[in-house]
Image (spheres, grey):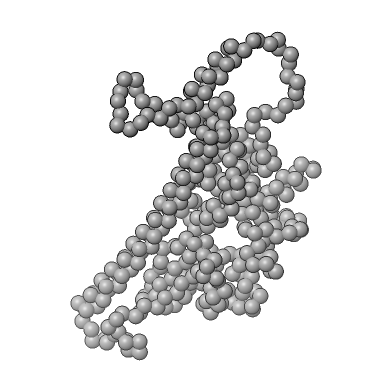
Amino acid sequence: MLYVVQVVSSGVAAPPRLFLDETRAQEAFVQSAREYWPLTYPQYCEQNELCPESFAAAEAFARTFDAGGGNLVHFWRIVPEDMEQDKAYPLSMNPAQFQQRRQQVVQAAQAMEQDSRSALGELQGLLQKIAGLTTGVEQLDAMLTGSPKDPVAAQEYRAAKVEEPAGKLSSEPAVLNTAKLAEKALQEEESAAPSLPDMGSPFPNAAPAWIPSAFAAKEPAPSQPVEAPPVEKTETPEWGKMVMEISGQIGGMRNEHKYFTKQDWRHDIYSNLTSLEYLDWVAVKVDQCITEAKQVGYSLERDLNEFGRFFFQTPAGQQSAKSYGSETTAWCEAFLHNRSEDEEK
């Protein structure tokens, strides 16, 4: 008998784990429930008076998941085609037959692992294509609505344009560098206009070109480089779950995150503070908020009245006035609450 345990968290399938011993497979099933749902699983066992270490409790917890929600824990029992359910292998089987059975099991396990890796690779490739399309749309938006005097739009123009060398014929039509043409036209306009005496700025308290968002004004490690975390961290299930959760929160008219805007991201890029893509940059920022909130003693509590929502709890044991729709949102609100407390002091 072959036993297979596989976890699907937020739509991301982890590699399957194979066992020949049922007890070890059940222990792995319980361990998966505890690792992937460290808050929800203990609360479920406490509410239903179940032992968190028992396979029955983990199996009952797994049945509460909605298949459409992207969270599942599989436990499969695989019986070879030539083996009856109620009959074990005869002890008189010779070593060659045992070796043949073993090779069949190993080949089946390798095939399952390869299929899982292939599916994961296709999903990652799809996410990269979506990120590339998002970048293309942003560049097109800058071409249509930006001003050449805006350094962000001007640099995007230059990056997006292709100039044909002088005197060279091409089979494809050349793309005009509209940014340079517009700049040249503006320079000619300004040189032709009569000069006026400098009267000073009518708005001495005018804001700078970059106005940080409300969250950026309180964000962790301001003006510090935002670099990619170690590979060992990004390959963990926790990091993958957080990135998938954050990607689902990016949207709206500007297709950006609620707390970390694309204007703040562009400011970091042109200040040479980061070279990360927008989604990766947001993930690092959220991770910094979570780390700081945990260090000062904040924690999360599940909303028992609404599934999938969380309260944050202050170091003094005070619960937030309302719950939030995801763990990352609750941690960001806990970080903001901590910074507000520091400002009042």
Q: In which quarter of the image is residue 310?
A: bottom right
Residue 341 lies, with reference to residue 189, above or below; the image says below
User: From the viewer's perspective, is 120 left or right of 37?
Assistant: left
Q: Residue furthest bottom?
A: 86
Quarter of the picture holding the N terminus: bottom left
Q: Nearer the viewer, residue 186 or 282?
A: 186
**Residue 34 location (% of width, % of height):** 55, 67
Q: In which quarter of the image is residue 164?
A: top left
User: From the viewer's perspective, is 4 left or right of 204?
Assistant: left
- Residue at 40% of width from left, 30% of height from top? 175
**Residue 116 location (% of width, % of height):** 38, 62
Residue 113 lies, with reference to residue 152, above or below; the image says below
Residue 300 seen by the camera: no
**Residue 72 location (% of width, % of height):** 50, 69
Q: Nearer the viewer, residue 34 or 156?
A: 156
- Residue at 44% of width from left, 68% of height from top? 6
Residue 255 seen by the camera: yes
- Residue at 60% of width from left, 38% of height from top? 263
User: From the viewer's perspective, is 178 left or right of 216?
Assistant: left
Tell me how many marks there are. 0
- Residue at 67% of width from left, 67% of height from top? 306
Q: Which of 296 and 119 is in front in this view?
A: 119
**Residue 37 location (% of width, % of height):** 56, 65
Residue 240 lies, with reference to residue 96, above or below; the image says above
Quarter of the picture holding the C terminus: top right
